[in-house]
Amino acid sequence: MRRLVLTAALLALAAGCTKDDTQSADGIIEPIPNPHQPGDFTPLPDPEVQDGSVGRAPRRLTVAQLDAAIVGAVGQRWSELDSRATSMGRADYALVVSENTEPNLVFAKFLEDGARKVCINQASAEMRMTDASARTMGRLLPEKWDDLTKLTDAEVRAQLVYMSTRFWGSPLSGEELTKWTSFFTQAATRVQTLASSKRHETLAVVCIAMLTDPRFITY
C-alpha cells in the first residue's frame, strides 16, 4: 500500500513538471501572438506594376553584359562600345567605383547609335551569304536574298519568331507577332522602292528595333 501511494505521488509530480506553459489554469491554450507584425518585413511588389511578376524588378544589363549580348544576338561586336562605356555606366575605379545599371537617356541614345551600326553592317554581310545556315540573324530567309516583299506571311512570322527568341530569349506570339509581321512587311515594301543595294535594310530595321527594345537590355 505504501509503495502504491509513493508511485502515485511520483506520477503526479512528473505530470506537474511537464505541464505545457501555453495552457492556462483552466486547461485552455492561450493564444500565440503572430511574430510577423506590420513593419517587420517588406511586402511583395504589386504584380500590376511588374507585368504580372511578383519577383524583383527588372535590371538593366551592365556594359560588359551588353557587349556579350550584342555579339550573341547580332553576330558582331559594337567596336565603339569601349569608348562610350564610361558614359553608359561602366565603373572606371578612379572616380566611379560601382557599375551604374539605371536606364537613362544617355544609355538609350548610345545604344541606338550602336544598334544602327552593327545591324546595318551585319545585315549587309548576311545578304551576300548564300549559305543561310552561316547567317546569324537572317537564317530563315531565302538562300538568295532578293525581294523580301515576296515572302509569305508564314515565312515572315517564322523569321520574326527566330529573331525574337535569339534577341530576347522569348518568342513573339499572338497579337504582338501580328504587329511585328506588319512592321516587317512595311519595311520590306519601303526598302524595295530604293536601290537594290539597300535591300539588306529590311533585316537591319527589324534588328535595330529588337536591339533597342527594353526586353533586350533588361533581365
Image (cartoon, grey):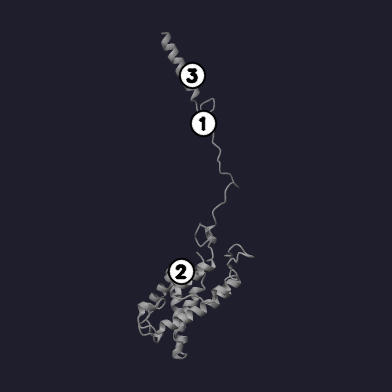
Where residue 184 appears, x then y in whole percent? 45, 80
Query: Which class describes the residues within 10 Å of circle 1: few (<14), some (14-19), or many (20+)?
Result: few
Instruction: Give left or right: position of 76 versus 38.
Output: left
Report the front residue among 204 and 11: 204
Tell which circle, 2 or 3, labels the residue nearer the N-terminal end. 3
* C-alpha separation, residue under disc 2 versus residue under disc 1: 56 Å
Q: Indicate which label's residue lies in the foreground, 2 or 1.
A: 2
- Can you name the residue that lies furthest to the front here? 94
* C-alpha separation, residue under disc 2 versus residue under disc 3: 71 Å
Question: Amino acid type of disc 3?
Answer: Leu
Residue 30: image quadrant is top right
Work out which quarter of the rendered image holds the N terminus and state it. top left
Tell me the SS state at disc 1: loop
Query: Which residue shows up at 40% across the image and 76% down it?
Result: 159
Question: Amino acid type of disc 2?
Answer: Trp
Tell me the SS state at disc 2: helix
Where residue 100 appears, x then y in whole percent? 59, 65
Report the front residue among 159 and 198: 198
Tag shown at residue 78 = none
Tell which circle, 1 or 3, labels the residue nearer the N-terminal end. 3
Tell which circle, 2 or 1, labels the residue nearer the N-terminal end. 1
Tell me the SS state at disc 3: helix
Where residue 111 appears, x then y in whole percent? 55, 74
Report the front residue among 9 and 138: 138
For the residues bearing labels 2 and 1, Cβ distance under 8 angstroms: no
Tag shown at residue 168 = 2
Instruction: Give left or right: position of 53 versus 130.
Output: right
* C-alpha separation, residue under disc 1 versus residue under disc 3: 21 Å
Tag shown at residue 29 = 1
- Label 3, on which residue? 13
Q: Is residue 176 visible?
A: no
Does residue 47 lie above or below 64 as drawn? above
